[in-house]
Image (cartoon, rainbow, N blue to C red):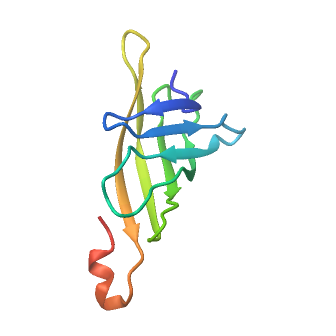
Amino acid sequence: QCLLSGSWRSDTGCRMVVSTLDKDNRFSGFYLPRPSTGDSELLTSPLEGSQQDTRLVPQPTFYFTVKWRLREAAQTTVFVGQCYVDTNGEETLHALWLLREVADSPAEDWKATR
C-alpha cells in the first residue's frame, strides 16, 4: 500500500521528506534539490500536497507544490503523479512537474512556465 509519508530520493538526487498524512490525506514537508551549478543557491523548500485515500485506491494519485526558496528568484513547482507498488512491495513515485517563474510583464508570460 502506497503511503507518501517518509523520505524519498529521485533518480537525479533530489530529496523529499513528507510528514504523516492527516485524516483528509493532506501532507506537508520539505524538498531539497540536488546540488546545482547555477547562480542561485537552492535551499530546503516547503511542500504541501494531497494523495488519494489508500483505502479506496491501493496505488493512489497525488499532487504537491513546492515553493522554492531561492536567493535570486521566485518560483513554484507543481508535481502530479501516482504511487506504484511492485511485486516485491517496493514503492515508486512517477510524477510530472510544471515550474512557474515570476514574469516581469504580461508580454513575458509565455516564457515563465516550463
Relative side of 72 to 98, left or right = right
Please identify the quarter of the rendering in which residue 86 is found: top left
Q: Nearer the viewer, residue 94 or 44?
A: 44
- The residue most toward the top is 88
Instruction: Please name the residue shown 31% across and 33% down the image.
Output: 11
What percent of the width, then of the height, locates residue 70?
48, 63
What percent of the width, then of the height, locates residue 18?
58, 38
39 is higher (above) or lower (below) than 17: below
Q: Nearer the viewer, residue 92 or 74?
A: 74
Count of number-bearing discs: 0
75 is higher (above) or lower (below) than 62: below
Please identify the quarter of the rendering in which residue 98 is found: bottom left
- The residue most toward the right is 23
Relative side of 56 to 10, left or right = right
What percent of the width, then of the height, locates residue 67?
52, 60
Q: Nearer the viewer, residue 45 or 110?
A: 45
Quadrant location, the C terminus: bottom left
Instruction: Please name the residue shown 48% across and 66% down the image.
Output: 71
What percent of the width, then of the height, locates residue 36?
34, 51
Instruction: Please name the residue shown 51% across and 53% down the image.
Output: 43
